Amino acid sequence: MSGPERCPVTDWQTDFDHTAPEYAADAPAIWQELRETCPVAHSDRFGGTWLPTRHEDISAIAHDTEHFTSRGVIVSVLEPQVPAPVGYAPPISSDPPFHQIARGLLLPAFAPKAIRPLEAPTRAFCSQLIDQILVDLPTSGVVDVAEQYAQHIPVRVIAHMLGVPAEDGDRFRDFIHRILEMAGQNDEPVAAEDTMLHYISAQIEKRRGEPTDDLIGFLLQAEIDGVPLTDDHVGGTIALILLAGIDTTWSAIGASIWYLAQHPEECARLVAQPELMPFAVEEMLRAFAPVTMARKVSQDVELGGKQLHEGDWVLLPFPSANRDPEFFENPNEVILDREKNRHAAFGLGIHRCLGSNLARMELTVALEEWLARVPEFELADPEAVLWSTGQVRGPRKLPIRILDPGTSATTKGAR
Amino acid sequence: MKISFNRDACQGHNRCYLLAPELFDVDDEGYAVLLVTGDVPEQLHAKAQLAVDNCPEYAITLTEENPPA
Ligand code: HEM
Ligand code: SF4
């Protein structure tokens, strides 16, 4: 992969780089050190970027749309081009008052009761994936669960909601890799017909003459004050749903399985006490929250004794907020039945993850189906686990060894 | 024990509805709807506390009826 030469980070307080592999591998330790020594850190990288690490500061920024704009949410050397309040991918890039209008259009499709019918097909799909894994299992018992299991689940669900073929999943992962994981680091040209923009325009064109009852069809028929949405709005929102719903959920499922692979006693507990699952899912989301967002400073403001200037980037590491000892008891411990858990994995304030109900369902179903079929497994090689870089953090390579696959296969017959 | 809910603070995280469906419903947009007015029945105190302790936006509060003097 070609990209600009990266200077190694020598000092995380003054020169952090959230896209560095060391950060990906060890972010929780870096946040902890910064929280104790320099809770609002600065780096000149990406044109000037701040990294707050305390829950209090992260929450304050997420709730303050006056000094912080969502015009840019992925830190990059490139300036976001589309101005507030609409931005390039409504509603994530939008500010009030437009934000609530764009979000309001989508809320009903992602509300808990609208998501419920997707549960059974998601469960069936997870079960099929496991069938395939067990059929293909080499005698070593080793399989990459990030690649063979976790990544396929959200792709299938999103394709279904948007009404596009599930086989396009490989292309989605390509878009995600270029746009999110390599944001600001990759200048390789991409052929026009391989871009996400091209893909989305083609999907829109297909629906022009014949309305469909999928989410793309819905957006094409939606109106704001009697006026249809602009093509840029429709395209931006579809791009957002594609990008926001896939590697995030993939990361959450992968990180949870990564944790469970190292804690057989917790697997056994979840199998024996399925009523713990709702708490366990939130605890996994807290401890391994995948998503760090960003804002641009829209008006000079002080934060934690530091002066932030208009145009600066500010990272919002919700995963760090989730490990702040001022806010959580024993934050570095995973306590599957934690009863007090106001975690911020899905953000805080008006941009609360639109897909949170969907993501929670996918994570729950993915873990339930996995544990029902593969209750015993371990990391095949801890050194081989590879965490993604950038603002979405989760395992991209996760080889595990399934113990006693014979039993797993028979459990299937018994179900 | 009285429960109150601040609709302006609610962002639809939906934690309350999952943990205490006897006390909370959700509307078509995913925002919480409080199902009880005022007093929380004795047998639901623990669930009410769970809802409070898991709402990321501090939109739910509980108050003791007879605060200790
Ligand atoms: C575990 C999985 C997920 C995590 C951790 C996650 C996390 C987040 C976070 C932290 C935000 C807040 C952004 C901000 O403050 O700027 C957000 C927003 C958003 N997410 Fe998710 N997300 C997940 C899954 C999904 C899924 C499955 C979808 C949809 C299919 C989705 C769609 C969105 C959208 C559309 C927004 C923008 C909402 C707005 O700006 O009003 N996410 N997500
Ligand atoms: S948990 Fe809080 S923010 Fe979420 S729906 Fe309930 S009241 Fe609203």
Image (cartoon, coloured by chain):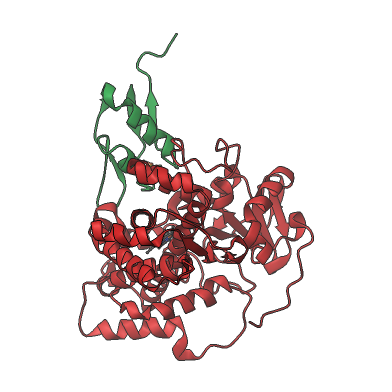
Chain colours: A red, B green
The foreground one among A181 and A335 is A335
Residue A154 % position (x, y): 38, 66
Q: Residue at x 48, y 79 (%)?
A: A174
Total labels drawn: 0
The foreground one among A233 and A188 is A188
Residue A212, above or below A127:
below
The foreground one among A265 and A295 is A265
In what quadrant does ligand 2 lie?
Answer: top left
Q: Is residue A278 visible?
A: no
Answer left or right for A126 relative to A10: left
Residue A90, above or below B14:
below
Q: Quadrant of the N terminus of chain A?
A: bottom right
Q: Residue at x 28, y 75 (%)?
A: A163
Residue A215 figure quarter? bottom left
Residue A229 % position (x, y): 33, 73
Q: Quadrant of the C terminus of chain A?
A: bottom left
Answer left or right for B26 relative to A177: left
Residue A59, above or below A294:
above
Residue A116 % position (x, y): 25, 56
Residue A275 % position (x, y): 33, 41
Residue most extreme to the top: B69
The foreground one among B62 and A323 is A323
Residue A123 figure quarter? bottom left
Q: Is residue A349 visible?
A: yes
